[in-house]
Image (cartoon, rainbow, N blue to C red):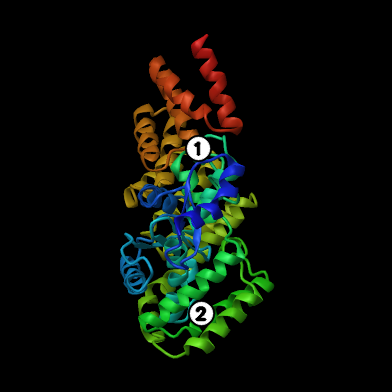
Amino acid sequence: MKNAVLQRCAPVLALMLLLTGCSVNPVTGENQLSLIGESQELAMGAEQYTPTQQTQGGQFYIDPELTLYVREVGNKLARVSDRPDLPYEFVVLNSSVPNAWALPGGKIAVNRGLLTELEDEAQLASVLGHEIVHAAARHSVQRMQQGMLISAGVAGLGFALSDNEWAGLLMGGAAVGAQLALAQYGQGDELESDHYGMLYMKEAGYDPQAAVELQEIFLALSNGQQAGFVDGLFATHPPSAKRVSENSKLVSEIGGGGYRGADVYKKKTATLRKVQPAYDAHDEAMKLASDGDMNAALNKINEAINLLPREAMFYSLRGRIYQEQKKNDKAQADFDKAVSMYPEMFVYRLNNGLTALQLNNLSKARENLTRANEVVPTSIAFLRLGDIAVKDNNRKEAIAYYSKAAESSGDIAEEARKKLAALTQ
């Protein structure tokens, strides 16, 4: 058996000039190439989970009970999965983009923007079961291995990000995790996750017909090009008529029926739906700001703040609008407010530090930029920490920060290299 496995792997290994082995997929039972061991898989997921959450909006702290509910449903499915001993975690993210994702090791997230589209707990179970299979079947790991093979000889796993506000700034593990969360799955992985996710649903007592309904809804929305879905769920989990057909076929084989939980789901998501108008106002303010209409954007974000004054995201956006209007004192006050409400969120710390630097408050800038980098390292934070070190006449520290920023790409890296050269001449 061992020789047969090695024979199947040998052509790939010879082609890539890499020495590795094969393993058995814990979900399908099929042999597959294995460059990344389970301990490394678990370590990557654990290290990248928090930074990846933060690049996708951060935790939805407004309603912690909602995360507990999602975790409860997720754990029901995880217990009947093919890898029940993975250290599964489930979190709700503060993003209107309808999406869900899984990192290696069972680190799973679902956006509040997707939860508002679902009708009952069975549909939620369909989403979570699907993501659990991605983790259990090591789909993310397989995609990383493909990247390693294709780019053999290139140091690290720094994948390029797209359609992300921080695409050019993220460094290290945060960039890798965000790439895994945002990258598109192939149809094979999607069909596999649908299939086994539905089996998990059935085993956990849910109606697998919900998975068919969900794909029908998603296919109709994708055909209609509904805003948000195309950039979110459909970008990473492309729907297809084949998925609907395969899901329907599986229901006919294993039988429908089971728990739906519409009333419970409605109750558990009541707060989310109640505060939705505030997030709608925020999203409209974002669009207005991106279109350059800062006065209209300011009016709309003030509307959001009036509706939900305990949401840090709103103050952060208003601070950015004030920055565009050259009102740095007001921007600083709003970033202070955002940090006080959600001190762990890197982007609030980052904006606070950058604004403090513009106001020449070096100690405040240094503290916030350093705290931001502890969670999600960014090239802009390293660059500006270098500037602060120069102002403090700390040449050694400035060189270290500029060297780090120079590892990135684009304008920030170029600026860092020029400043580094000036210090080392």
Q: Residue furthest top?
A: 425
Q: Nearer the viewer, residue 315 or 136?
A: 136
Label 1 or label 2, whichever comes before in sequence order: 1
- Residue type indicated by callout 1: Gly
Within-10-Å neighbours for mark 1: few <14, some 14–19, many 20+: few
Pointer 1 with pointer 2, Cβ within 8 A: no
Looking at the image, residue 171 lies above or below residue 231? above
Q: Which residue is mark 1?
A: 156
Residue at image location 58% in from the left, 58% down from the top = 184
Which SS class for mark 2? helix
Residue 399 screen position, x and y as percent? 44, 19
Residue 309 screen position, x and y as percent? 38, 60
Image quarter of the N terminus:
bottom left
- Residue type indicated by callout 2: Ala
For residue 334, the mark is none
Residue at image location 39% in from the left, 40% down from the top = 372
**Observer able to see residue 117:** no
Residue at image location 48% in from the left, 24% down from the top = 402
**Observer able to see residue 398:** yes
Within-10-Å neighbours for mark 2: few <14, some 14–19, many 20+: many
Which SS class for mark 1? loop
Q: Nearer the viewer, residue 345 or 243?
A: 243
Looking at the image, residue 339 lies above or below residue 132? above
Label 1, label 2: how far apart the Cα atoms are: 37 Å
- How many discs mark residues in the rendered view? 2
Q: Nearer the viewer, residue 265 or 150?
A: 150
For residue 211, the mark is 2
Residue 259 screen position, x and y as percent? 39, 87
The mark lying in front, picked from 1 and 2, is 1
Looking at the image, residue 396 lies above or below residue 112? above
Horizontally, residue 375 falls left or right of residue 32, namely left
Q: Nearer the viewer, residue 375 or 249?
A: 249
